[in-house]
Amino acid sequence: MTYKLYNRTGSGGFVVEAALTLAKADFELVDLGSKPGTPLPEEFKSTNPWGQVPTLILPDGSTMTECAAILIHLAACFPEKKLAPLPGTSAHAAFLRWTVFSSVNLYEAILRRGYAFRFTSDPDAIEATRSAANRRAGEAVTVLEGAIEQGPFLLGSSLCVADPYIAMLFLWSRAEVDAPRLNTLAQGVRQHPVVGPVWRRHFGER
């Protein structure tokens, strides 16, 4: 069972690489060799028409995109690795809730700030779009902070694949809010013996 992950250093594909590494899955990493925020090669659209990474080719040759969806899928493919709580439990419901929340609220706000031109056709509205995105990111961070009840990770003492995702988005959010629980979660991800080296390869000591 071999996966192929199309990615670039410092991108959201970090979380998929981390999940595959946690699962001890056999995968090929294809580094597209460009910086986040710059266009991917036009020919890459034959692999992913949306032209974004991460893009994961599954062992059967089918294609998956979208970080949250890939994380949920990989957790289901490797239940023995405990990448997420068991389906049907309240812990699994929380895992799904906050993984999807992070994707559609926090990640969306970060992208709206970085790519404001995609969200308005009025050049005079670019800065207002970015300002609103910053506010929304801070609000999402505050909600996630409140979701961490016990810590150090989202669901308690054990890391799940939502944790590196949230840690990455928290780093990118640059939210100016008091978030000690998220800081602890991010520190736990950076220090994790398996995920930590993947983090440092993508984000250094940040």
Image (tube, grey):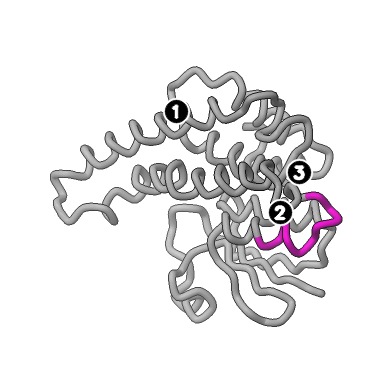
Is residue 189 shown left or right of residue 133? Answer: right
Vertical position of residue 197 compared to residue 179: above or below: below
- The residue to which callout 1 is attached is 175
- The residue to which callout 2 is attached is 87
Vertical position of residue 179 compared to residue 121: above or below: above
Figure quadrant of the C terminus: top right
For badge 2, the amino acid type reads Pro
Q: Is residue 80 magenta?
A: yes
> Residue at (71%, 26%) from the top-left corner?
152
Query: Mark 2 or 3 closer to N-term?
Result: 2
Q: Is residue 197 magenta?
A: no
Answer few, some or many: residues within 10 Å of disc 1's Cα (few below 14, many 20 plus, some between 14 and 19).
Answer: some
Expressed as whole percent of the image width and height from the top left, the position of residue 199 reads 69, 42
Where disc 3 sits, the SS reads helix
- The residue to which callout 3 is attached is 195
Answer few, some or many: residues within 10 Å of disc 3's Cα (few below 14, many 20 plus, some between 14 and 19).
Answer: many
Q: Which residues are magenta?
A: 73-82
For badge 3, the amino acid type reads Val
Figure quadrant of the N terminus: bottom right
> Residue at (44%, 49%) from the top-left corner?
104
Where disc 2 sits, the SS reads loop
Expressed as whole percent of the image width and height from the top left, the position of residue 136 reads 35, 35
Q: Are marks 1 and 3 in contact (CB under 8 Å)?
A: no
Where disc 1 sits, the SS reads loop
Residue 182 or 197: which is nearer the viewer?
Answer: 182
For badge 1, the amino acid type reads Ala
Expressed as whole percent of the image width and height from the top left, the position of residue 159 reads 75, 39
Quarter of image, res 162: top right
Vertical position of residue 178 compared to residue 5: above or below: above
Q: Are marks 1 and 2 in contact (CB under 8 Å)?
A: no
